[in-house]
Image: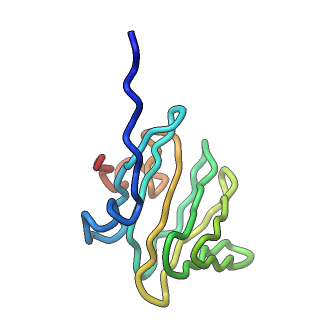
Amino acid sequence: MTVPAPAKVNLSEKLGQFTEQWSPRIVARYNGNDVMVVRVEGEFVWHSHPDTDDFFLVVDGELDIELRDRTVTLGSGELFVVPTGVEHRPVARRGEVKLLLIEPRGTPNTGDEATAAVKVEI
């Protein structure tokens, strides 16, 4: 039995399908991970992930990732990985930011299942 090849994913098209902020959309799956796009503006909550790193790639805009001891600023085309268990807060101070995120399937974006956004596949 031959498995059909998946369709390519156009990130700009996927980001154009929604306007909600801080609401990740799954665009692909990769080795048990969700590959997601999200639009963000303003501040997110301080949180950590006890079982996984947190991967951020800026597609468009400028994002600050606040850590307790420093702030990492990312521009378009730059990425940063927050290590497992490190408390952090993404902040989009200078307008909307479009991101690509990768995390293990089912990881709550706030670090807490009770407060996490529901992830929709598009």
Q: Position of residue 85 (x, y in %)?
A: 65, 52
Q: Is residue 83 left or right of residue 96?
A: right
| Residue displayed at 48% across by 66% down | 99
Q: Nearer the viewer, residue 98 or 50?
A: 98
Quarter holding the N terminus is top left
| Residue displayed at 74% across by 75% down | 69
In the picture shown, does residue 114 fall above or below 77? above
Q: Position of residue 109 (x, y in %)?
A: 45, 55
Q: Nearer the viewer, residue 72 or 15?
A: 15
Q: Position of residue 25 (x, y in %)?
A: 34, 54
Please count the marks in the image: 0
Colour logic:
rainbow
In the picture shown, does residue 56 fall above or below 35? below
Residue 6 quadrant: top left
Q: Position of residue 114 (x, y in %)?
A: 35, 50
| Residue displayed at 60% across by 47% down | 50
Q: Is residue 19 left or right of residue 103?
A: left
| Residue displayed at 49% across by 53% down | 111
Residue 22 quadrant: bottom left
Residue 23 quadrant: bottom left
Which residue is farthest right?
A: 69
Which residue is farthest top?
A: 1
